[in-house]
Image (cartoon, helix red, strand yellow):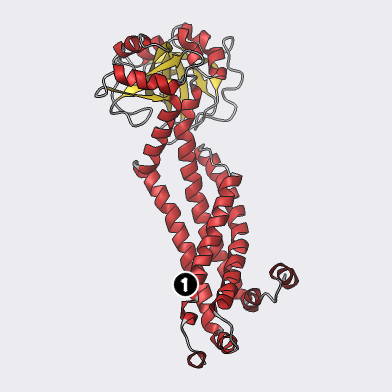
Amino acid sequence: MTRLLTFVFGRLPIGWLQLSHNRTRLLAAIAGVAFANLLVFVQMGILGALNSTTTAPYALFDADIMVSSADANTLTDGSNVARQWLFQALGVPGVADGAPLFIANLEWQRTDGTFSTLQTFGLGTDSAHFLSGEIADGFHALILEDTVLIDRSTRGLPAGSLDGVSSAEPFLFEANDRTLSAVGTLDVGGGFSADGTLFASDQTFLRLFNARSSSAPNHILLKVDEGIDPGVIVERLRDVLPADSVKVETLAGAAAADLSYQTTERPTGIIFGFGVLIGVLVGIVIVYQILSTDVADHLREYATFKAMGYDQKFFLGIVFEEAVILALFGFVPGLLASIGLYAGMSAATGLPMVMEFDLAIAVLSGTVLACSISGAIATRRLAGADPADLF
């Protein structure tokens, strides 16, 4: 390692030699940095799962514009919208088609006594073109009463229990005092507010949730004429529809607004964000303690260098060298432990926790920066000290 670092730095790696001189302290420092990395990775992984599960439902739809209640911050909260706004929107030039969308959570108690919450979407069977490919292909079968498409990745279900589900071999289950027949599956998975997803026709949906009215869907989906920018139609609709009752966004804009609300205003997103900050602070404190102790232990050597004419940049270079070495050596075990923890948490919770390359690079960059900040703070004692005072 000494030879390699000598080649990299073009000089004797003083920082590495000082760190490796006390192996116990070096291992403790690496473990501390690895632990800080693990904290950040876990918080970032959960935050990433929150982001993924927030935007995933929007990918199930093939629409250009979404009309929602003015008080709706996410896909599932807020008041219902009046169906009359659909007919008014269809009269706006550039709007090609529209469909009401119904959403509710369905509590499903299985025969073994366990529960799963299914986020249930209701849509007219003549509106399959508002759905993504996999769902649209099987949606025509839902014209029959009490037929549904069920999420084969529903949290809590035994693996493979929905394999082979089709119109010829439906999966029967009871919910809300009705017997439902799953004639197809989709793959979405669980999130923070539901364990899986269910699709039904609007008529089946209204039978399941008999307190709901066909005149008050949760959202209205719109398609625009080919070749027209949806943003232009959004502005036209905002001029026509009452701003105090509804808000109009492109589907992508609605997903982005939902994500922003979940991560910056809801307690869950804020807590995980603070968790990332705490992990960074823990890393800075740990590395600062290691480096400041190292500086204190080598004050006489630093005093000798200073008396020989070496300036503050030289000392910063040594401590930064130590900081970068600790960052790199601590990052690797932290990354490996996080990958294993991601796999375990994903298996236990069903949340999509995957170690992505961009995330790993971001955490590595942050680790190097945090360690460098710690190094800069640790060398403050040397900045204005007189060599005679250091002896």
Residue 81 in view here:
no
How many numbered tags mark residues here?
1
The quadrant where residue 244 appears? top left
Up/down of 74 relative to 294, above or below: above
Tell me where residue 270 appears, x and y as whole percent.
37, 47
Give the class, few, some or many, for how many residues have Cα within 10 Å of label 1's Cα (few <14, many ≥20): some
Tell me where residue 50 appears, x and y as whole percent.
45, 39
Quadrant housing the N terminus: bottom right
What SS does tag 1 mark? helix
Up/down of 386 relative to 64, above or below: below
Residue, x 56% and y 13% (percent of image)? 137
Determine which residue is flagged by label 1. 377
Comparing 97 with 162, the one in front is 97
Comparing 246 with 333, the one in front is 246
The quadrant where residue 113 appears? top left
Up/down of 314 relative to 134, above or below: below
- The amino acid at mark 1 is Ile
Tell me where residue 162 appears, x and y as whole percent.
57, 22
Query: Is 189 positioned to the left or the right of 249 in the image?
Result: right
The quadrant where residue 24 appears? bottom right
Residue, x 50% and y 50% (percent of image)? 42
Most extreme residue toward the left is 244
Tell me where residue 213 appears, x and y as whole percent.
30, 13
Query: Is 224 positioned to the left or the right of 247 in the image?
Result: right
Query: Is 214 positioned to the left or the right of 380 in the image?
Result: left
Residue, x 33% and y 32% (percent of image)? 73
Residue 263 in view here:
yes
Comparing 106 with 66, the one in front is 66
Residue, x 40% and y 38% (percent of image)? 260
